[in-house]
Amino acid sequence: MSEAGSRSLSARTRYCAVLGHPIRHSASPPMQNAGIAALGLDWRYLAFEVRPEELGTALAGARAMRFVGLNLTVPHKLLAFSLVDARDASAETWGAVNTIRFEARDASGEWQPLRAFEVLPEDAPVRAHGFNTDAAAMTRALREELGFDPAGARVLLLGAGGAGRTAALKLASDGVATLFLVNRTASKAAAVAAEIQTRFPGVQVEVGYPDGTVDLALNATSLGLKPDDRLPFDPGVFRIEQAQAAYDMIYRPAQTPFLEAARAAGCRAANGLGMLLCQGARALELWSGQPAPEAAMREALEGSVYGSR
């Protein structure tokens, strides 16, 4: 039994959770519960299947039950942007929310994380404060796991949905030279390209595949979650050998068809486990006010993902 699972629950135990649809593949609970245990907190981290049309109700329920905070995964990150009461600069910059911290006013009228209150007055207002920990986590993971420096790079980004849009904007802000955007619905890729051209005019953006080589091919689609999924790119138009490195935001399964093809072609390759760790560690810091115990979190995460292949 895990350390988190062996600790007893009480009426004082507080809760965090991840909401998504689907959610059964999530490795956030073992990772976050390991971090919570290492910090000695009487908290538990759960996972809930929440359909998009029920997200507002779920957020209201977590607020009413005085959850410490929430993580949001597909497809809720863009939806939550308009549902939170306040947004951090990270959420405003990237236009998406993947972390919520519930807060209440203290005696002086200042908003404080719920961890600061042993007992809340019955009439105390509680707000949902939205953050984005994904963008910084992505570039940190790319740097640490692939040695990738975005400045001046050529990048093929597969997917222009919530995760893809955030990735595109962050890479543009980090100074990539050229972004090639590919999405099943071309109009969505065109909309992201137009946003980048407005916000980061120094970045060249093209909708479609590159003719030559790229420094990085990044999969921000959900293709690879299921065993029978096709590749997230069209091998008749783009050869994975054209990429120096490949990164898949998917972490379970640990080896997707995209990564298998990339490694077979000799590319440096990594899955999304490092990104999950980085964004999750930052979320735990926002909730707890303490440095995240990343070693304990990584050990639990690797055991969950690689132990179940």
Image: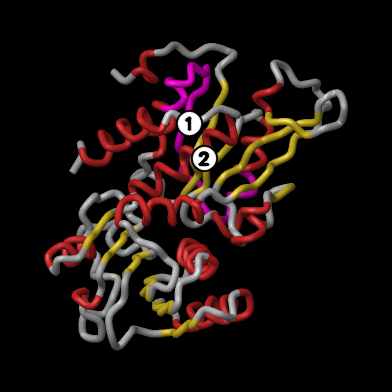
Q: How many tags in the picture?
A: 2
Seen from the viewer's position, the closer of residues 103 and 263 is: 263
Separation (CA) of disc 1 from disc 2 = 7 Å
Q: Name the residue carrying label 1.
A: 292
Residue at 33% from the left image edge and 47% from the top image edge: 273
Seen from the viewer's position, the closer of residues 275 and 183 is: 275
Q: Is disc 2 placed on a helix, strand or loop?
A: helix
Q: Is residue 49 left or right of residue 214?
A: right
Furthest residue in direction right, as rendered: 108
Instruction: Find residue 282 and name its label.
Output: 2
Amino acid under disc 1 = Ala
Q: Position of residue 267 (x, y in %)?
A: 20, 65
Packing grade of label 1 (10 A; few <14, some 14-19, many >=20) is many
Q: Is residue 67 left or right of residue 253?
A: right
Of the 4 image quadrants, the one containing the N terminus is: top left
Q: Position of residue 155 (x, y in %)?
A: 38, 73
Of the 4 image quadrants, the one containing the C terminus is: top left
Packing grade of label 2 (10 A; few <14, some 14-19, many >=20) is many
42 up-or-down from 109: above or below: above
- Image: magenta residue range: 35-57
Q: Position of residue 99 (x, y in %)?
A: 57, 45
Residue at 73% from the left image edge and 31% from the top image edge: 112
Amino acid under disc 2 = Arg
Instruction: Find residue 154 and name its label.
Output: none
Q: Is residue 289 left or right of residue 213?
A: right
Residue at 57% from the left image edge and 22% from the top image edge: 14
Are discs 1 and 2 less than 8 Å apart at CB?
yes
126 up-or-down from 91: above or below: above
20 up-or-down from 227: above or below: above
If you read the primary sequence from the N terminus, does the residue marked by circle 1 or circle 2 appear first? 2
